[in-house]
Image (cartoon, helix red, strand yellow):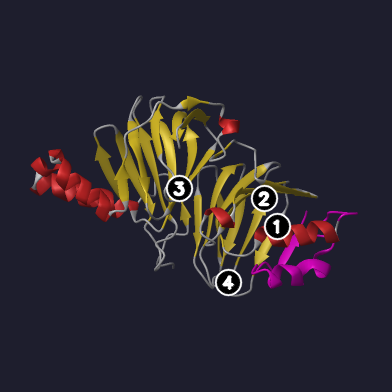
Amino acid sequence: MFDNKIHITPQDYIHELEEKDCKDYLFIAPTGEQLTNEMSDVYYQKDAFVPYHEHSKGYETFLIDRGSVEVTINGKRAIAHAGDIVHIEPYMSHGFRYLEEGTIWRELFSGMNMYGGIMEKRFIDKAYPELLEDPDFMAAYRLKHHTIRLGEPEPEAVSKEEMPQIRPKGGSIAQFCFKGITCNQKVGRHETGGEKEIWEFVLDKGVKAEVKSPHPDWDLFVVKEGQVRFTVLDETFTANPRDIVNIPPYTPYTAESLADKTVIQANNVKGLGLRLLEIVEKKLENDGDLAAHWEEIQDIFAENGFYVTKIARE
């Protein structure tokens, strides 16, 4: 029925690449002029590493799905663990070392076409393998892909809580608590060049959202814990932990939490979520029940770029 796959399990990758110390599985190719929502999983061998470098454009958001990673950013180093998020902006020097066999590094890119650059390197390896050892050629190749390799300084060891680019599991840069729904902002609009926000929602069983107004952007979710039942047009499916749900523009859908403490991450929030929730929190400060007061607040959602037509609780 659909031209694109909406419910994407970890086995539903569209392309696979194997390198000397990892395997890369592409789920979603870059979308639109801004090359947004590119998503893949990389399975790393123990002690594999990404050398210290920076990018002149694009944003990277990484979720550690399994294992632990030594993260070096702007001269500081900390250990990030399963469930943590790492967010990198342009000109932010960074490098990684993967500390456990089979670490799963889930990648979300915007404005970069990272997978296309990796494919190009494979083409070079097939036709001109000697060029991969030519420092001048490789410097030009990286520059084409907006990447600069850097000499790594002796980093200062800190806790991950002292490194703002690491968002520990369960943490947030802003949090709003309503009845049955906790909203954790994981990445702010100011950290993506104004393009979008990333939010994590912790839901009680029976919380349901309907989007039955024509929304112009892709809605990209990852289930982290629990289960969510989606109905997209006339198809219903259950998304489990690590599943991706990629809903096209102008496509009506509903989503319902099937377990208490279900955790779902929204990776392409184009609406003004922080502004919206600040207003709603103030308006409902004596109650905090979004479902019970939906008629009072639905216009606030629309005014801030959200196409939710109903929020309900079982």
Mark toward the viewer: 4 or 1: 4
Q: Amino acid at mark 4?
A: His
Along the horizontal axis of the image, is 2 left or right of 14? right
CA separation, marks 4 and 1? 18 Å
Mark toward the viewer: 3 or 4: 4
**Sequence order check: which comes first, mark 4 or mark 1?**
1
| Residue marked by disc 3 | 9
CA separation, marks 3 and 2? 18 Å
Identify the mark at residue 101; answer none if there is no mark.
none
Q: Quadrant of the C terminus?
A: bottom right
Residue at the image point whose x is 87% and y is 55% from the top: 285
**Sequence order check: which comes first, mark 2 or mark 1?**
1
CA separation, marks 2 and 1? 6 Å
Residue stretch in magenta: 285-314
Q: Secondary structure under badge 2? A: strand
- The answer to which of 73 and 32 lies nearer the viewer is 73
Crowd around label 3: few <14 · some 14–19 · many ≥20 (10 Å): some
In the figure, residue 236 lies in which quadrant?
bottom right
| Residue marked by disc 4 | 215
| Residue marked by disc 1 | 208
Q: Secondary structure under badge 4? A: loop
Magenta stretch holds residue 312? yes
Q: Amino acid at mark 1?
A: Lys
Q: Secondary structure under badge 3? A: loop
Residue at the image point whose x is 75% and y is 72% from the top: 299
In the figure, residue 36 lies in which quadrant?
bottom left
How many numbered discs, if any? 4
Q: Quadrant of the N terminus?
A: bottom left
Mark 2 near mark 1, Cβ–Cβ under 8 Å? yes
Mark 3 near mark 1, Cβ–Cβ under 8 Å? no
Crowd around label 1: few <14 · some 14–19 · many ≥20 (10 Å): many
In the figure, residue 240 lies in which quadrant?
top right
